[in-house]
Amino acid sequence: MTPLTATLFLLFLQLFSTGCEKKKLLIGGMFPMSGGWAGGIGCLPATQLALHDVNKNESLLQDYELELVQVDSKCMPGLSLKKMYDLLYDNETKLILLTGCSSVSTFVAQAAHMWNLTVLSYGSSSPALSDRQRFPTFFRTHPSATLNNPTRLMLFKKYGWQRIATLQQTEEVFTSTIKNLEEVIKAGSSVDAPIEITVRQSFQTDPSNAVKSLKMQDARIIVGVFYEDMARKVFCEAYREKLYGKKYVWLIIGWYPDLWYMKPDPDVDCTPEQLKIALEGHLTTEVVQYNLNGAKVTDTGITTNSFLERLETVLQKLNGSDDSASLSSLAGFVEAPLAYDAIWALSFALNKTIGDLKIKGLSLEDFTYQDSVTKDTILDNLNKTDFEGVSGRVSFTSTGDRIAKIQIEQMQNGIYRKIGVYDYMSDDLTWQDNDDWEDDHPPADRTLIIDKLRKISKLLLYIMVVLSSVGVIFSVSAILFNICSLRYSIVRNSLPCMNTLIACGCIICLACVPLFGIDGEWASVEKYPTFCQVRTWMIMIGFTLSYGTMFVKVVYSWQISKISKESKAFKNAAVQPDSVELLIPKWKPYSLLASLLALDLIILIVWQKLDPLKRIVDSFPTELPDASVQSDIKFQPLLERCSSKHMTAWIGITYGYKGFLLIVGLFLAYETRNVKIRAINDLRLLAMAVYNIVVLCLIAVPVTLIIPNQHNARFAFVSVATIISCVLTVALLFIPKMLPILSNRLDMDEEETQKSLLNHENEKRYDELKKKNERIKQEISQKENQIQKLHAALQRKYTTQLSSEDQGTSDSAFCEDNSKEQEPL
Ligand code: ABU
């Protein structure tokens, strides 16, 4: 061969080879090989498979070859920006950027349009990325996480969960997911069964406090959105806090690889076994990322099954493992079909773009970062994408999102099991009925709080009712006795009318005892306020009738004794019954009693009109039915009581006024204990009754104020104090009068009784007077005897004189003698 021939041959070869060589279209690929979502591990091989298949395909991009220039973004936004600059400003212009991991895509897609670059993501779920203003050149084959939210709402409704808690990592991808969940819930929950997010917790890198708060706030149904590395930390904390088991359901992201919790993680202090325990039964929702018809040949030329087989072969070679189970636990394995389809979607769009650009006299290989025409044409064609890929139907909404079905899985014995598929667009749920729950039913969304009204012990109530009834019978008997025994001075001289009023007051107070024990068991909610009113009226009137009358009696006695002491006529002498009326008219004490009653009535009427008593229910800390058992049921102890708006003021007025009467009564009773008033013969006993009431009131009132929540103790205390004070009062005032009369020692008795009622000084004086009286009586009878003797003697003498007159005696001599005889008289 001559040199010319050789030169021509080489030139021809060069020309031929140049003509056959495909033009490279460069794709800048960012793959997270580590970090929150290390999806590059599964997605990079899938992308390479797709590039291989596309480049091999004769009908696509004939003159072009797609080439990937990849970098590791580590799922870190800051680093990814640096890597993006490296990609843009190495020697060759990139036509498209391929991204994974939402936080990276958010940064890259926000900046890329400045270089007229289109960003296509195979692994970004952030709902925030659907914002066309912010991300004008962004497309993704990965569906938005918002697609999970209608499915979550469907699950809430299906299981009857209304109180939802959320736990999120503070990344925009999760913040926007939860924001969208709130909107979906708001729009989709019905008025009859409203669903609401009641607890919201978030964390950046350490979820311990957030998990503790969830526990404290009794969160049961927890929607958790966080990256896989954080998920291990969250469930380790949930294990420690015992936020798992039959009472709790976690709904988390479904795109973590299988057995993600087994991955060794130096940042997590729990063993895989512990994580497995904490994760048991949790639910996941995730977009179906592979074609449900695995055997169907897709528009990419292969079936989903064959794609997965090829991917597994590649991954086995890369990872040196032939266990398909362990391959599915590689990060990004789930999203691999999305990465494969992303390259195909790009190829279809670029294929169309070639023709479109040709018309405009442009070509793909001439693309520069200033070329907005090419960029717009690519975007236009990506928008029109519609093909059947290995991940299902690939088409984009106006915001660049994909539409897909959602798969629901549950962890059963440490393995994810598919339990249903939900098509949000057609609201079609395919439920497999294989969900499994520890208690055979899904947990409740809250602890069932059952109201438990604290009631007075029936036995205690019956005992008090019996005792108070005995007291009433005794008081009624005392009144009857009082009325029937008025002919006895012992009764007559004790102001019997007042004693009857005292006993009546005691009967009213005793009748209040059963009313103190009325609670929800006996009175309906509507009737309860009536009981409140009735018993307040009764106890106030009863107290004034009993104690008020005693007070009046004591005041009356004190006034009499004071006046009698000052008056010379009564000095050092007992005031006689007839004299009392002269000192102070009897209507006066009754008018004082009437004033006290009138004051009561005024207070009660004003109280009832202005601020009526109502049924108030106090609640106490919830109690477990059985402290040893983890239960969904708790009891809420409730206690009814009567109260009004300004109860403290009313209590202050009533107690203040009654307290004043008690103190003054006590003082006067002490002062008059030794006073001698025949008309009021039971002053000493009255004083004792006053002491008894004062002491019991002084003990009972503060104690009942201190233990308002101990309903049984309070009731027992108030009832016993009422019964004792009433029965003792009636007993002290009536029994010393009843005994002598009823034992028929009437005559001797009256004196004896009187004697017993008078004080010692009186007794001595009485004995002296009695002796003196007897002496006088004796003297009188002696004188009478003498008179009779004289009379007899005179008669004899007169008879003798009459007979001697006959014999000549005169009348004047008889008179003289008679006067002489009468003198000693
Ligand atoms: N399925 C992976 C999504 C990762 C991300 O949105 O960051």
Image: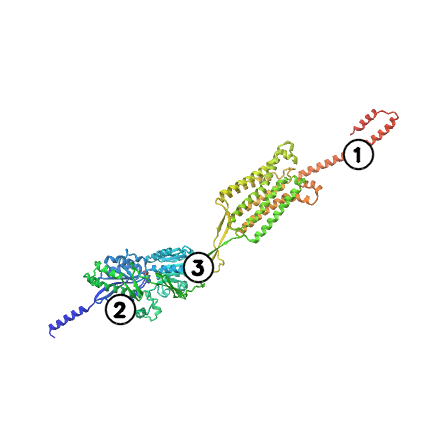
Q: Quadrant of residue 58?
A: bottom left
Q: Are marks 2 and 3 in contact (CB under 8 Å)?
A: no
Q: Earlier in the sequence, mark 2 or mark 3?
A: 2
Vertical arrangement, residue 320 with respect to residue 796, above or below: below
Q: Earlier in the sequence, mark 1 or mark 2?
A: 2
| Pointer 2 residue | 53
Say which mark, if any, is on residue 444.
Answer: 3
How much space separates mark 2 and mark 3, taking CA atoms?
Answer: 51 Å
Say which mark, if any, is on residue 607.
Answer: none
Q: Quadrant of residue 54?
A: bottom left
How much space separates mark 1 and mark 2, taking CA atoms?
Answer: 163 Å
Pick out the residue farthest to the bottom.
1
Side of 371 where 296 appears, left or right = right
| Pointer 1 residue | 785
Give the position of the C terminus as an image quadrant.
top right
Q: Amino acid at mark 3?
A: Ala
**Which is more toward the observer, 223 or 320?**
223
Q: Quadrant of residue 334?
A: bottom left
Q: Amino acid at mark 2?
A: Asp
Q: Residue at 56% x, 38% y: name it.
A: 595
